[in-house]
Image (spheres, rainbow, N blue to C red):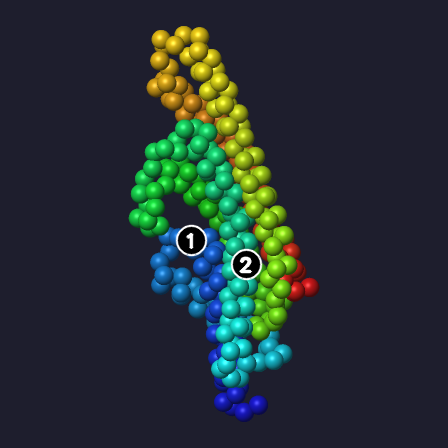
Amino acid sequence: MSLSQELMAQAMAAALAFSRTSGFVVTSPFPGPYAGPTQRVGLALMLAWVASACAPVAAHPVTHLDLRVAGLAASELGVGLLLGMAFRFVLSAADVLAQTLSISTALSSPSVFNPTVESQEAPLALAVSLFGLLVALAVGAHRVALSWLLESFRLLPVGSSVPFEAATGSFVDLAATALVVGVGQALPVVAVTLVAQVTLAMISRAAPSLQLFNVGIGIIIIAGGMVFTASLRDVTAGLGQHLLSLSWRIEQLLGLLGAG
């Protein structure tokens, strides 16, 4: 291989590595929606530089620009997207918990405008989602995701043929697990607020003149807040245990993608 072909092969390998890391940064909850485009591109470039320096040499290096390069770039982008989505699906248990708590405590109607993501968000749901992200950082889920991203360059070298359809069942399982974990952690609050609502409904039925609507909302909010505060230690432990499953989830995903 001549010097020009060697340089072209290294440049193509770095570009394909950047495609994979870019896909991961786009879909991964880390660095998150609060990071700007410059920070995201910088993180993707840094990860691609590290990966291209440590990854094994491809069996069939790319030395020419042709349509095959576009297909390989799309494949590498798809691998990065799947790895980032796996991280997001695992962390989405915190979002399910946040939405369930917000609805059960009647705090889903008030909303604030988040200028970073340019959308309306319920304050309680936003606070619980950020709490879940804090738990993820505390247990090192972001480090696990980044380490598996770099490890994927060894298990799935750049330019490998990837059967993306094999990952469908894994993501269905990830979504179902996140739903079960999120609802399960919010179940004490849901149960208490449901009992409070049924009790208030029975009182209103027996004495319609009392007009308990305004008072009842306050009772539901206070009851839900007290139960969530009392169970916060268990919720933190449950979310942390779920987030610790990220490592073997990504390992299973890479196995389905052909890493063996």
Compared across the picture, whether 224 is left or right of 254 comes to left
x and y, in percent, of residue 30 in the image? 46, 54
User: x, y (%) of residue 141?
Assistant: 53, 51
Quadrant where the C terminus is found in the figure: bottom right
* Category of crowding for the residue at label 2, using alpha-carbon neighbours closer than 10 angstroms: few (below 14), some (14–19), many (at least 20): many
Q: Quadrant of residue 131?
A: top left
Residues 2 and 68: in front is 68
Q: Kindly identify the residue that appears in the image at 45 percent across and 59 percent down.
A: 26
Residue drawn at x 44%, y 8% as measured from the top left: 206
Neighbour tally class for label 1: few under 14, some 14-19, many 20 plus, Cα within 10 Å: some
Rendered residue at 36%/61% (across/down):
37
Q: Secondary structure at mark 2?
A: helix
Q: Count how many numbered circles sit on residues in the image.
A: 2
Res. 177 image quadrant = top right
Mark positioned earlier in the residue sequence (1 or 2): 1
Q: Position of residue 176 (x, y in %)?
A: 59, 43
Where 219 sits versus 59, above or below? above
| Residue hosting label 1 | 32
What label does residue 93 carry, if any? none
Disc 1 marks a residue whose amino acid type is Gly
- Height in image: 225 above or below 211? below
Q: Which residue is mark 2?
A: 82
Residue 245, position in %: x, y? Answer: 60, 48
Q: Amino acid at mark 2?
A: Leu
Label 1–label 2 contact, CB within 8 A: no
- Is any part of residue 230 visible from this angle? no
- Quadrant housing the N terminus: bottom right
* Quarter of the rendering containing residue 108: top left
